[in-house]
Amino acid sequence: MMKRFLLTILSVLVIGASLISCGTQKRMSGTPVIDRIQERGTLLVGTTGDYRPLSYKEPETGEYWGFGIDVAGEIAKEIGVSISYVPTSWPTLSADVLNPELFDFAIGGITITDARLETMDMSEGYLCNGKTILCRKEDAGKYKSIEDLDKPEVRVMVNPGGLNEKFARANLPSCTLIVFEKNEEIPSKVAEGEADVMITEITEAPWYVQNDSRLAAPLLESPFTRGQIGVLMRKGQDDLLKKVNSKIREMKASGRLKELHDKYDLIYGY
């Protein structure tokens, strides 16, 4: 009798706890995203930290810098909160964005694509983008087209999981493809002769050319693709998406976005 009584009490407690939890989740899901961010006091931003000059984490200090980092900082100021960066990676980017426990949005070299828009939201573009190459300066005259790259003797290096790898696999089936884990180290691998070409973006290539005299970006003015970079976030965060787009428009109108283009020597446009 006592055992049955205790089991009944336990069942009531479990059901009650479940109802409280569901009620809490319901209230949280109904709370505007920006209100939750302001209550937390911090905007959580996912970023890879491996993409100069858009998002880079200095290994010695742990400090983040870059075009995307500056844009994220402007958005945090607009919301009235501090900012904290959460590491993500190109292979795990989509899964991390879809996980509500990790961060509010992701930024830093993320191209707006139809595939991403099927399952996630993206802001308006704030930076032009397009696929191009890095190679050794003495080899710049060799590579003028896709056909010049798509040969077994051409060693093409890409980072895993992102659009660079997808582009190479789709367009360069005959090259010798090398997938290297650390995106930020690939330019030096090319310069040192461990690969011949890096598939990269018009946003990334100029920085490496300016900072490593051994490298060239011969197709910078005629990229293989053209697109725009934006902020990536989960669907259902409509108030946050509206705030982000509003801030991007304001930065365009005020000239602040142009200032950032000039600061990082990036091609102006969006």
Image: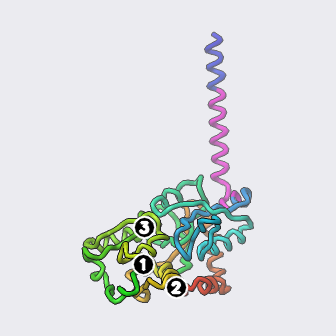
Q: Earlier in the sequence, mark 1 or mark 2?
A: 1
**Residue 99: x percent and y percent?**
54, 54
Look at the image and give the residue range highlighted in magenta: 12-36
Residue at 31% x, 71% y: name it: 170
Residue 30 within the magenta-colored segment of the rendering: yes
Which element carries disc 1, helix, strand or loop? helix
> Of the residues shown, which amino acid type is indicated by label 2?
Gln
Which element carries disc 2, helix, strand or loop? helix
> Which mark lies nearer to you, 2 or 3?
2
Can you name the residue that lies furthest to the front here? 192
Q: Earlier in the sequence, mark 3 or mark 1?
A: 3
Q: Which residue is mark 2?
A: 210
Residue 265 within the magenta-colored segment of the rendering: no
Q: Main secondary structure of the magenta part?
A: helix
> Of the residues shown, which amino acid type is indicated by label 1?
Ala
- Label 1 to label 2: alpha-carbon separation: 13 Å
Residue closest to the eye, 29 or 225: 225
Question: Is residue 48 rendered to the left or right of residue 197?
Answer: right
- Asked if residue 239 can be seen in this view, the reply is no
> Which mark lies nearer to you, 1 or 2?
1
> Of the residues shown, which amino acid type is indicated by label 3?
Asn
**Residue 259: x percent and y percent?**
64, 85
Q: Which mark is residue 159?
A: 3
Question: Is residue 244 rendered to the left or right of residue 155?
Answer: right
Q: Which residue is mark 1?
A: 191
**Residue 91: x percent and y percent?**
45, 60
Q: Earlier in the sequence, mark 2 or mark 3?
A: 3
